[in-house]
Image (spheres, helix red, strand yellow):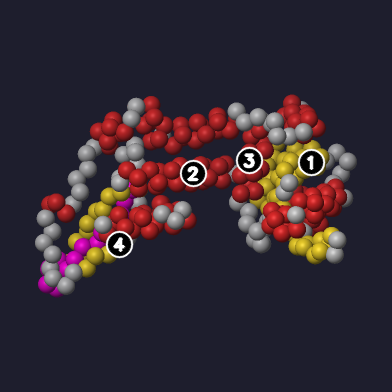
Amino acid sequence: MYAVSHTQQPVLKMDNVIAFPPRTERAAESGSSESVLDLKDNVSLLRTWDRAGEQDGLDEFSPKVIKALRELGESDRCGALCVLRLNEYRLLEETFGRRISQRLAEMVGKRLRSCLRGTDLLEQVTEDEYLLIFQGQTDNVLLEQISQRLLSDCSGTYTLDGLRMHLSANLGITRFPQDAAEPSLLMRYARIALHETRPGSPTPYHFFAQNLLKDLQNRVWMAAEIEQTLAEERFELHYQPLFDIKSQEILGAEALLRLRTEAGELIAPDRFIPQAVEMGLIGPIGCWVVG
């Protein structure tokens, strides 16, 4: 919201108010009817993203992990899949080098394995990421206890070659079959849950929920929409007169910023301004407003 005030009384004419063509006309100008339908129908858009996620392969994982995931999907047993990420690993690797960081990852793996049962699976899938599979376990309370122990045992101070370094970790949790049955979706959802955690947060673990997926997809869609709207100058200003009640005179006007999507939807600033700030685009948007 941008306020514009004047010392002299402005004259607000009809050309101060932007007239918009019907949404159907704007949608027809923006592209094919199929693409417009996907953008306007949020449910259809979410399904499209889900189908894209189901096509992800498991090529990045070892045969042991792929076998465990497929066995979990083919069996009637319940289970949980967790992704644990070391927060400071990349910084420590840049600081002390690859040799030290790899030895550090091995030490973390040993600490994690000491917490697990014989039926549990632990696999390092990237330099700073571990996959854990718990078969026969979906109770939230017990999974919270397991998560707290895992994070507590692998976090803290490590000493290697006389060098002291601190590590902390976060954990994303998804459950089979409640959250997903497809192995690739289980992995994807666990990482989405992990995305909700923050280094140093009081709860460094997070369970997957469908609203997390929708929120993340909406953020991705909104980011692309903000950038495209700025490039195509599809932002709009609506002017709301400011009246003096006593004199019944117009003292100024309030400029209200709106985002018009490619499909014709009008979006209020509370839905896109915070994300525009995060993207570093609030400056260019402000220049468009005053320009």
Q: Position of residue 143 (x, y in %)?
A: 75, 48
Magenta stretch mostly in which secondary structure?
Answer: strand
Q: Is residue 159 magenta?
A: no
Q: Label 4 near label 2: C-beta < 8 Å?
A: no
Q: Sequence order check: which comes first, mark 4 or mark 1?
A: 4
> How would you rate the neighbour count of disc 4 (Cα within 10 Å): few for under 14, some for 14-19, many for 20 or more?
few
Q: Residue at x 52, y 34 (%)?
A: 49
Secondary structure type for disc 2: helix
Q: Sequence order check: which comes first, mark 2 or mark 4?
A: 4
Determine which residue is flagged by label 2.
220
Q: Residue at x 80, y 54 (%)?
A: 100
Q: Amino acid at mark 3?
A: Tyr
Decide: is 239 above or below 116. Answer: below
> How would you rate the neighbour count of disc 1 (Cα within 10 Å): few for under 14, some for 14-19, many for 20 or more?
some
Q: Sequence order check: which comes first, mark 2 or mark 1?
A: 1
In the rendered structure, the answer to whether residue 195 lies left or right of residue 284 reads: right
Q: CA distance from mark 2 to mark 1?
A: 30 Å
Q: Sequence order check: which comes first, mark 3 or mark 4?
A: 4
Q: CA distance from mark 4 to mark 1?
A: 52 Å
Start-end of magenta stretch = 245-259
Q: Position of residue 268 (x, y in %)?
A: 35, 51
Secondary structure type for disc 1: strand
Q: CA distance from mark 3 to mark 4?
A: 39 Å
Secondary structure type for disc 4: strand
Determine which residue is flagged by label 3.
189
Q: Is residue 249 magenta?
A: yes
Determine which residue is flagged by label 1.
123
Q: Label 1 near label 3: C-beta < 8 Å?
A: no
